[in-house]
Amino acid sequence: MKMVVAIIKPFKLDEVREALSAIGVQGITVTEVKGFGRQKGHTELYRGAEYVVDFLPKIKLEAAINSDLLDQVLEAIEKSAGTGKIGDGKIFVSDLEQVIRIRTGESGQDAL
Amino acid sequence: MKKLCALFTSMIVLCCLSAAAFAEQAASAAAPVPNKGDTAWMLVATILVILMSLPGLALFYGGLVRVKNMLSVLAQVFAIFCMISILWVVYGYSMAFTAGGSMNDFIGGLSRVFLSGMTPDSTVETFSKGVVIPEMLFMVFQLTFAAITVALTVGGFAERIKFSALLVFAALWFTLSYLPMAHMVWFWGGPSAYADPSGFIFGKGALDFAGGTVVHINAAMGALMGAIVLGKRIGYGKEAMAPHSLTMTMIGASLLWVGWFGFNAGSNLEANGTAVLAMVNTVVATAAAAFSWMLAEWLLKGKPSMLGLASGAVAGLVAVTPACGFIGPMGAIVLGLLGGVVCFWGVTGLKKLLGIDDSLDVFGIHGVGGILGALSTGVLASPSLGGTGVYDYAAGKVAEYSIIGQVASQAWGVGVTILWSGIVSFVLFKLIDRVMGLRVAEEEEREGLDTTTHGERAYSL
């Protein structure tokens, strides 16, 4: 099992969600985050006070998946979240040791 | 025959009685009675100025501070309004607007303490001979001015002042700075007693229609001294202290503008052409200032901001306050255009120069704008520039106008206000700091005043 974490541009969320559903990913968790990479921030001005804001709003998407599905998931996210411009985001893949469905107590593949 | 005599007698008695009644009515008709239109207008004007404080100023200021301090600002404005309301009716009105005997140059007397002797039928004259409004109405109208002036000062020491120390300061500053200023600038005998002793600044011929000196320069000095004595906020210049809700600030600014019609036009004390003039000036000067600030910011900083529009509007309102009943609308436009740009400098260039953490720019806008407005009144009130000139009650007509002479009179007002208010404010802050401490503890300032002082959160998201 793998844990796939993707940082994407906020307006891409719906597209990514649809693309993942289409290939059989049943559930995802979404958080609103701030971050920066190579994309530049901007300046805000309040009367005489200037603020340089480095952090940009992003969406963090997490999905626990079957290892077999990994390549399809990566391709789906890359295609749907990409715009070709700096700031499209990154995907992090890690091994997932255990998954448990709280209601039934199922574990492993059955809990995905 | 007897019946006829009785009838005749009773008719004569009736005639005598009604004649006496007519005579009495004729006698009381000699004492002026308030006009219902004037009274209705002044009631509305009073309510509009209350709106300026609650919630106008509260939201304008509140939106400019960080989330963790929003409630503290709202609470400070609200509490000050309540406290000053009581102090005003108990002794404030008397000390501002009655004759003060030997001290009359600087302060009034105690004849109206607890509003003693004032009934719903008591009257005071407006600026027109023989025209009166209920004295209680004049009193409550002026109450709203006292309250908002004190509330204005909190902008200078937002996000770090101890609530208890603020309340003590407010009561003392109201007594020692607001009351003498109101008396010095606005106390006189009225059109029917124009030669009676007046306040010192009034006696110098200074014109201040609605409070450029009494309210704005006065409050600005209070805020500035507080900012100096309290010191800068922790992290000032390094950490982000951006406004948490410019939406609230815009709502506040809008309520201030609308309420200001009561402030300026209501200062005419009656509903006539001069009140209308004040209203027109309050529209155009404000609009011009909002625009000129926006353009200045657009040119010099790159973007036209909502905060710039709101701040420019307030700057225009401040500048036109002393002038509104004395200048012409074209003069008001000029004043507004100037006010927007000069106050923009006040919150940028001047602020950098002074190096003081006047958190919400009270001096930059109310101080600079008030000084500009008060001095400009001396120029723009001239009939040669569309102004009304100064009415000479002794001669019964508008006097010869000397721009230089009038500006000199205005300078008296500005100078005395800066000195008196500055010294009183500074001394009070030092004293209160010595006795009870002005600032909250560092951890409390870091966490925010809402939770640490007031035990609440502004927003539960």
Image (cartoon, rainbow, N blue to C red):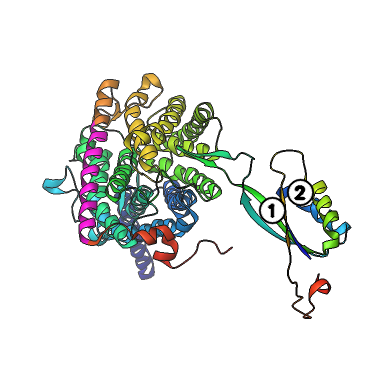
Helix, strand or loop at disc 1?
strand
Name the subunit of mark 1. Answer: A
Q: Position of residue B261 (x, y in %)?
A: 46, 42
Q: Residue at x 37, y 22 (%)?
A: B383
Give percent across and percent down for residue A19.
Answer: 84, 54
* Residue B120 in view here: no
Q: Could you tell me how far apart the alpha carbons at marks 2 and 1 are, in whole angstroms?
A: 9 Å
Closer to the chain start, of discs 2 and 1, is 2
**Nearest the eye: B345 or A1:** A1
Q: Is B181 above or below relative to A70? A: above
Q: Which mark is residue A59?
A: 1
Image height of B214 relative to B70, above or below: above
Write the start and end of the magenta stretch as one range. Answer: B412-435
Residue at coordinates 35% horizontally, 47% vertically from top-left?
B156
Displayed quadrant of residue B200: top left
Which mark is on residue A12?
2
Q: Percent position (x, y) of residue B161? A: 34, 56
In depth, the one of B28 and B419 nearer the eye is B419
Q: Residue furthest bottom?
A: A104
Residue at point 75%, 72% (across, down): A99
Q: Is residue B432 magenta?
A: yes
- Check the picture and name the quadrant holding the C terminus of chain B: bottom right
In-front residue for pair B194/B371? B371
